[in-house]
Image: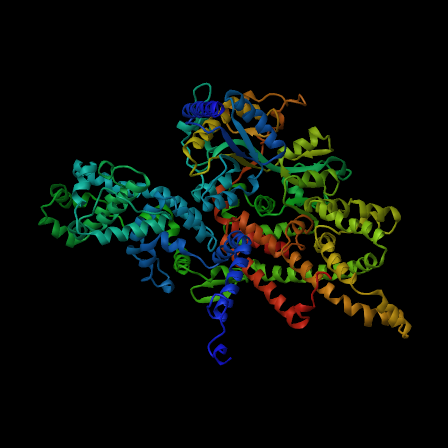
């Protein structure tokens, strides 16, 4: 009898305490599911964002899900099933645009939802034109560019330094690794087929232009190994399977500086793309508040600069650039390895989101048919 | 004796007719059996059948266009797609009001994406124009507010259009909005449209009613206190363009009469621009007939378009026609998938048969050890096995290195056995081999070795004994293994993706692309349905030729 009473009393106490606690924290959820790409990139986010954030917020549980590659399809499936289990999702800008279009991500007001720069510059101005679409919160600038084996450069020739060297089989024989999709490849092909940079997308919007790009790619088709995962090219380069190949600059940085492979960067005509956060639509109030709070923290000037200590991707804020320091483990200056560094960015391309949102499926169908020929 | 004989039905112990009593017991037993399997049945139904059926249903479903743009689709019926002229003003006007609501619900971009699968360019056209809809409406709003400031207040509109007698109209608007937004629009909205207003100002009342439903149910605000959408102002602008309405306003004396009369008096201050021009200003492609033809073609609730696309055909106004050669890919992939699956199945038979034979004829202890070797790959992740093949097969890989070292292959001409069909066949044969060996083994285990000995003692050669006596008895194992391997390989996509390069990929790779990358689930569903039908057809053929009773998985 006594035991039961004690038990009941203590249970009541615990419940009361629990609800009191819940009242205090009703505003924000105690756990948060963050979706990212895995690997070194996710690790850099953990170091720069979630670990400092969790230190400030006691008892917060951060769950990671490495599903960014299928984020759009999964979010759509979750939305249809009526239960979204993700709170913050890391996606490339093109996917953010799609999610926004589909009503699967919430719209962001940079002025209100994002932190201003330390000198008072508004977030909108600080991010500038990197605020693509209404739902996307930019985080990093990365680029797709070429790396080549320094020990496979033909004797007597200079190291390849121009994008068109990729298409020059006479001067630079050997296999190339290109991504198994039209994006970036067709732009490079047109650039090297005499189309001016500013006309590339106008040309690509026409049937003839698309054919022209494929015809140019056909000149090297037999020498191409097509990759579909970002890790493929560094591996192919390390194995000596290819002489040059396109991939994300951070992957090449890791192969060159961390694994000390004999690989050189080409940088010419690198295509800038953005990666950042979106917050799924239809989250419960407490989780939404947590997600907004986290994103505001994780995209402030210092945090974005911190991420560059762990991976060679450029922070998306202008105000973060001067704060970029040295690599956390290697101790080398990170600035010269950033795609946005003036020496690397002499000739660049910005991924055209509107164009590819329109033409992705159409050109991809043609590209795949061309591949299968 | 005579009175014990009965001519009626036989009775059970409790006196009821035996037949009924028996059938009742049987029924009870059947019910109990059904109850026992009910968990599995429900599980299979919920997790397997329903998702598959709903996914397959997407291959014909196309309601998004008519639900999101109902009035546009209706107005478009009048348009002759072959006229070479863009549709007339009524269509653009309907499009403005449809799209305004769709933009509030963020559905316009979804329609844009849907139509973009059929014609590139429509996605950005819908997205871009969605942003300028507010501006279009604001022109009307600014002009009206300039004429009479009372147009600015929320009470003005609420009083002008509130009333009664238009319940069926309200119900209809609710249904249309619910279909468009994909959520229920039931509940009290604190507003009822007046039949009189509806008669006098049809476009205004309609826009305001939509606004009221949306504000009350989705935004959860009080209708009477909210400023109406720009579309409501545009609605009034549209109504005032009709001479009849202008005439009726002269004799109107209900709420807001003064402001309406002022608007009529200053009618030349209202925007005179047609909606067609406004849309053209936002994106000149709205005048392009191609986009409208696509919309007309894909406005019905159900479409054969996805199925036609998945067999390299396309829907056009003139009828079904072949896709341009540069875009034909699916038929090729279907044939390649079937053809390569057949090769893989054949390779599995060739490699698996001797292994199964050895396993079946070795002493149990040795056979068990070898069996572990067969099963070992099963315990390794598929991805790991495929990646291991990558290491083996690439040009600087293990196999090429050994061949070069042995002098069989020249260093400059290393074999290309990966990133092509060969790579897919090699890796998939290895991965699927256990599915062939296991059924073969279990069937061979049951063939008594005495039969072979008997055949030989009767004078048969080794070959005859094998071919006439042993082999026919092992055919059910081959059948079972072949079905397993063939059907599994048809659906593979990870292995072909990794080692298949360009000419070693299957149709499943395209299905995966449309599911996860292009989000064209309708096309993915159509491709999946066709694949399913092909498998069922092959299964049927197999049953007719070999007989499914001849398939044995064991004993």
Picture quadrant where residue B334 is located: bottom right
Q: Front-most of B461 and B157? A: B461
Q: Residue furthest bottom?
A: B2
Query: Which quadrant is the C terminus of chain A positioned in?
Result: bottom right
In this picture, residue B273 sits left or right of residue A313: left
Q: Residue furthest front?
A: B1
Q: Residue furthest top?
A: A119
Which percent across, then down, holds residue B25?
51, 64
How many numbered discs, if any?
0
Is A18 drawn above or below residue A180 in the view shown? above
Colour convention of the picture? rainbow
Residue drawn at x 12%, y 52% as measured from the top left: B247
Q: Front-most of A231 and A314? A: A231
Q: Front-most of B550 and B111? A: B550
Is B376 drawn above or below residue B302 in the view shown? above
Residue A344 in sight in this render: no
Picture quadrant where residue A19 is located: top left
In this picture, residue B320 sits left or right of residue B490: left
Which percent across, then down, holds residue B234?
25, 45
Picture quadrant where residue A150 is located: top right
Which percent across, then down, holds residue B512?
57, 51
Which percent across, then down, holds residue A174?
73, 45
């Amino acid at each position: 009898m006594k035991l039961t009473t004690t038990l009941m009393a203590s249970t009541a106490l615990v419940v009361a305490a629990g609800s009191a606690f819940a009242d205090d924290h009703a505003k924000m959820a105690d756990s948060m599911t963050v979706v990212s790409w895995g690997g070194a990139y996710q690790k850099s986010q953990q170091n720069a964002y979630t670990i400092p954030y969790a230190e400030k917020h006691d008892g917060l549980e951060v769950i990671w899900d490495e599903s960014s590659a299928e984020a759009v399809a999964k979010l759509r499936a979750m939305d249809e099933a009526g239960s979204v289990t993700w709170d913050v999702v890391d996606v490339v800008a093109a996917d953010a645009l799609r999610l926004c279009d589909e009503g699967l991500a919430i719209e962001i007001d940079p002025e209100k939802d994002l932190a201003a720069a330390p000198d008072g510059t508004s977030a909108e101005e600080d991010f500038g034109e990197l605020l693509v679409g209404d739902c996307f919160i930019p985080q990093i600038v990365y680029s797709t560019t070429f790396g080549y084996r320094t020990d496979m450069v033909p004797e007597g020739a200079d190291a390849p330094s121009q994008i068109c060297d990729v298409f020059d089989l006479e001067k630079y024989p050997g296999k190339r690794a290109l991504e198994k999709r039209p994006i970036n490849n067709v732009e490079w092909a047109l650039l090297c087929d005499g189309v001016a940079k500013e006309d590339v997308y106008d040309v690509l919007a026409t049937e003839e232009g698309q054919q022209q790009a494929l015809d140019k790619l056909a000149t090297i088709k037999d020498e191409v190994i097509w990759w579909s995962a970002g890790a493929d090219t560094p591996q192919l380069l390390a194995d000596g399977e290819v002489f040059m190949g396109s991939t994300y600059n951070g992957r090449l940085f890791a192969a060159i500086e961390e694994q000390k492979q004999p690989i050189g960067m080409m940088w010419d005509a690198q295509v800038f793309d953005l990666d950042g956060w979106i917050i799924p639509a239809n989250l419960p109030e407490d989780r939404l508040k947590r997600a907004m709070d986290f994103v505001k923290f994780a995209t402030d000037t210092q945090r974005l600069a911190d991420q560059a200590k762990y991976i060679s991707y450029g922070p998306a804020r202008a105000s973060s650039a001067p704060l970029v320091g040295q690599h956390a483990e290697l101790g080398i200056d990170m600035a010269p390895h950033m795609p946005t560094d003036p020496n690397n960015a002499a000739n660049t391309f910005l991924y055209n989101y509107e164009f590819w949102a329109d033409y992705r499926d159409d050109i991809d169908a043609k590209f795949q048919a061309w591949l299968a020929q | 004796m005579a009175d014990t004989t009965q001519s009626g039905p036989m009775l059970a112990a409790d006196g009821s007719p035996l037949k009924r009593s028996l059938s009742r017991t049987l029924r009870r037993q059947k019910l109990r059996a059904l109850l026992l399997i009910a968990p599995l049945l429900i599980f299979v139904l919920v997790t397997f059948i329903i998702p598959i059926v709903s996914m397959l249903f997407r291959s014909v479903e196309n309601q998004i266009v008519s639900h999101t743009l109902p009035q546009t689709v209706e107005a478009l019926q009048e348009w002759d797609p072959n006229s070479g002229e863009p549709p007339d003003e009524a269509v653009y006007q309907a499009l403005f009001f449809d799209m305004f609501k769709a933009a509030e619900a963020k559905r316009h971009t979804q329609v844009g994406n849907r139509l973009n699968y059929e014609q590139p360019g429509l996605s950005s056209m819908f997205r871009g124009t969605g942003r300028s809809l507010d501006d279009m409406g604001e022109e009307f709003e600014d002009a009206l507010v300039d004429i009479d400031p009372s147009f600015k207040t929320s009470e003005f509109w609420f009083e002008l259009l509130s009333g009664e007698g238009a319940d069926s109209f309200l119900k209809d608007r609710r249904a249309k909005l619910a279909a468009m937004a994909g959520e229920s629009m039931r509940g009290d909205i604190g507003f009822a449209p007046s039949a009189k207003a509806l008669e006098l100002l049809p476009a205004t009342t309609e826009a305001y009613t939509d606004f009221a439903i949306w504000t009350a149910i989705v935004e959860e605000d009080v209708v009477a206190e909210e400023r109406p959408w720009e579309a409501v102002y545009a609605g009034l602008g549209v109504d005032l363009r009709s001479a009849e309405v202008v005439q009726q306003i002269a004799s109107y004396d209900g709420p807001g009469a003064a402001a309406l009369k002022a608007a009529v008096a200053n009618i030349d201050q209202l925007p005179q621009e047609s909606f067609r021009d406004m849309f053209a200003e936002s994106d000149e492609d709205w005048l392009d007939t191609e986009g409208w033809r696509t919309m007309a073609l894909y406005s019905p609730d159900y479409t054969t378009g996805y199925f036609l696309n998945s067999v390299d055909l396309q829907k056009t106004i003139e009828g079904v026609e072949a896709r341009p050669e540069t875009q034909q890919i699916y038929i090729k992939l279907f044939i390649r998938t079937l053809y390569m699956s057949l090769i893989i199945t054949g390779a599995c038979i060739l490699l698996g048969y001797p292994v199964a034979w050895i396993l079946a004829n070795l002493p149990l202890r040795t056979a068990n050890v070898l069996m572990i070797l067969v099963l070992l790959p099963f315990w390794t992740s598929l991805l790991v096995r495929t990646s291991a093949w990558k290491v083996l097969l690439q040009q600087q890989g293990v196999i090429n290195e050994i061949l070069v070292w042995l002098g069989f292959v020249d260093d400059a001409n290393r074999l290309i056995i990966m990133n092509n069909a060969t790579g897919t066949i090699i890796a998939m044969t290895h991965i699927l081999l256990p599915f062939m060996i296991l059924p073969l083994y279990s069937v061979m285990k049951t063939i008594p070795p005495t039969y072979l000995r008997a055949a030989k003692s009767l004078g048969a050669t080794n070959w005859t004994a094998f071919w006439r006596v042993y082999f026919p008895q092992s055919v059910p194992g081959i059948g079972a293994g072949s079905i397993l391997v063939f059907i599994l390989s048809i659906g593979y996509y990870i292995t072909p993706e990794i080692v298949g390069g360009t000419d070693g990929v299957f149709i499943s790779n395209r299905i995966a692309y449309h599911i996860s990358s292009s989000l064209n689930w309708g096309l993915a569903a159509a491709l999946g349905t066709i694949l399913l039908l092909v498998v069922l057809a092959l299964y049927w053929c197999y049953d007719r030729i070999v007989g499914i009773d001849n398939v044995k998985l064991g004993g």
